[in-house]
Amino acid sequence: MTASSVALVGTAVFALAATVAQIAPDTYLDLLSGRFVADHWLPHLDSLTLAGAGRRWIDQQWLADLLYYASWRVGGYALVVLLATLAMAGGFAVLTLLMVSGGVQPQRAALFSMAAVFMVLETQVQAQSFSYLFYPMLLWVLCVDSRVDRFSPRLGALLLPLLVVWSNLHGVALLGAGIAFAYALVRSARAAARSDRRSSLGYLFTALACPAALLATPYGLETIRYYRSVLGDHELTSVGGWRPLGVSQPLFWIFVVVAVVTVACVTFGLRHARPPNLVLLGTAALVGVLTTQSGRYLIWFVMAAIPLAAEAVSSPTGSRTRAPEPRRLAVLLAAALVLLLGVLGLRVVALVRASNASYEAESAPRAVLAATTRFLGCDPEATVLADQESADALLWLDPHSAGRVAYDGRLEIYPAAALAGWVDFIHGMDVRAALGRSDYELAVASSANGKLALALRNVRGWRILLADKAGIAVVRVDSNAPSCRHEGLGAAGRPGR
């Protein structure tokens, strides 16, 4: 029953994720960075944008970027999507296994996992997709170790390689290392209190090795600078998932509901002599506090709180009697698995058959970017101020635009004042002044930033180069590239690679 429940969750999540997964600005940025790593090895100074020119660029997630780019080279965007969805599906399968190992009935564990899926499944393909797999793996390793009384070398053998690989894939490895460090330190103190010197030293060494694992990247000590630049940049709090949760956001209410239900389940468990899983309790409490400061932590809060709640309302493993598996339930699970495999097969075929152009048409203002690319070809001195949705895609689709685009999605590399001005521009605030005091020839916006796109249609001193339902590009009336004005730039086309 355990294997079928885990397989059912993994297959269901794979099919669901493959259906809703989207190529997004972060995907283009990952592919762009992966191409840079493949061509030049690790970046250290930015050469892609005007605002970041010459500033330090640490591609902490270089391995994820390289994996995505290699996948794209082999199978286009379809293989990139499949790689990301495989990581997410594997993560929820591990989450199910974590709950089963904690005493939750397999079918109930599957239900709790699917509840988590519908709350936090990411639709955008990005490096973070790998953290869906590594985060529950970390929790599973810690929970298994918490059930033994003494230190086992198995903890370090599983935990440290996991953190080393994760630290080259995505920045959430910092959170994982912090959780592992706190766990090992507490276990070391508890072992010392009972005079178990061997266990105390073993856990202490493991605790010290956790932050060291974050430095096991080609950047070495420079990685510290990256984390400091990300966590210490207050301007990031005004952008996307970095913003604190507010009552007007659906994510806020997901957080509140999950927190309330988890507290209720833990209270129920205590009343029935079922102490909570301390690893999951400590993780959920820590990440819950972080979630109140930044919405991007909600995923990791839910993935700790859901198994905590599930274990709290399940009978303790030691007192549970194993009843024979109901034949009818086994048949239903098998039928559901076969059905999901069929759906999955059809979805994979659809993904593979889709062209690269169709993925780009759904994720970027493709015709607008094609016109922008041709304009840049007419005027070698022209530069572009674009929103993130357009900038990341432009730099990926047109390698020759490198060094001519103002900003892209690597927000941590820009000076705080410059980043604040770009964020205001993206939000459609004071657009006329931003363009008036700049030397840019072009300004581009995706329809995803509706307020900015509308403002660009009416800004004085600029004319529309191309506008459609996906986005808009405008050019200065006094542009220095007159030959570009009569080349039919309104026609859609594919930027060269």
Image (cartoon, rainbow, N blue to C red):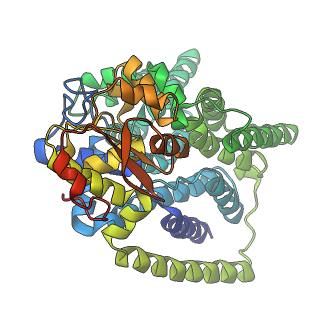
The residue sitting at 52% across, 70% down in the picture is 15
Q: Residue 166 or 201: which is nearer the viewer? A: 166
Is 473 placed above or below 423 here? below
The residue sitting at 56% across, 34% down in the picture is 149
Residue 349 falls left or right of residue 296: left
Q: Residue 348 or 462: which is nearer the viewer? A: 462
Residue 270 falls left or right of residue 53: right
Is 177 placed above or below 389 here? above
Residue 69 falls left or right of residue 142: left
Quarter of the figure with residue 417: top left
Quarter of the figure with residue 56: top left
Quarter of the figure with residue 57: top left
Image coordinates of residue 115 in percent, x first then y, are 68, 56
Image coordinates of residue 155 in percent, x first then y, are 43, 38
Image coordinates of residue 372 in percent, x first then y, are 28, 50
Locate the N terminus and report the quarter of the image it occupies: bottom right
